[in-house]
Amino acid sequence: MAKRQDDPRELDWNVVVESAGEKFRGTRGDDHLVGTDFADTFNMRQGGNDRVNAGQGRDTIYVGANLAADDRINGGAAYDTLVLKGDYSSGVTLQSDTISRIEEMDLRGGFDYSITLAPDIRHDKINLVVDATEAQSLYIDGSAMNFSL
Ligand SMILES: [Ca+2]
Ligand SMILES: [Ca+2]
């Protein structure tokens, strides 16, 4: 039994489990989920007006076709990714707090995405990386924003 502790595979396995964080899953109602210090995944595809505080770690938040202006998705520290997958042709408006501390937004699947940036959105959103390589179309309306560079 003592030999198992010297087995490097055993140690690696422990490290992976510790850094992987947890898997959270929302409901069709309004959820408020708080992540761990590690890399969590949040499945928020079910809808509702959800609040997510992902905490530290490289978190991934899946919102499917249900990201709405009233959601409050806070990625917390580190590089966090928000994944959209669904028909957004009727448009979603990102208000100042809809997403915060999110570094990358992936637009998955062959869907149409229409995203409006509200006038009060904070300037740190300008650094958002948007991966739309899978999307059928992407339209971003930032005309309401007030830039002061
Ligand atoms: Ca929900
Ligand atoms: Ca986390």
Image: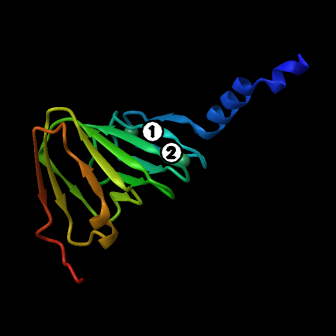
Q: Is residue 141 above or below residue 54?
A: below
Quadrant including the C terminus: bottom left
Residue at position x 60%, y 49% from top? 37
State the quadrant of the N terminus. top right
The one nearer the camera, 96 or 78, is: 78
Residue 47 rendering spot, x and y as whole percentages: 32, 38
Element marked by disc 1: strand
Q: Nearer the viewer, mark 1 or mark 2?
A: 1
Query: Which mark sits nearer the N-terminus, 1 or 2?
Result: 2
In the displayed structure, 7 sits above or below 59; it is above
Q: Which residue is mark 1?
A: 42
SS class, disc 2: strand
**Residue at the limit of the structure toward the top, as seen here:** 1
Q: Which mark is residue 33?
A: 2
Task: Please give the name of the residue rendered at 14% of the width and 32% of the height, measured from the top-left corner.
Answer: 110
* Neighbours of disc 2 within 10 Å: few (<14), some (14-19), many (20+): some
Q: Is residue 33 above or below residue 128?
A: above
Residue 139 appears left or right of 124: left
Residue 40 position, x and y percent, is 52, 41
Residue 6 coordinates in the image, percent (x, y): 82, 26
Q: Amino acid at mark 2?
A: Leu
Image check: 30 left or right of 21?
A: left
- Extreme-bottom residue of the structure: 148
The colouring scheme, among rainbow, by chain, secondary structure or one colour, is rainbow
Task: Please report the residue visible at 21 percent of the width from the left and 66 percent of the height from the top.
Answer: 118
Please state which of residues 83 and 9 is positioned toward the viewer in this rendering. 9
What amino acid does circle 1 point to? Answer: Phe
* Residue 14 in picture, x, y percent from top left: 70, 31
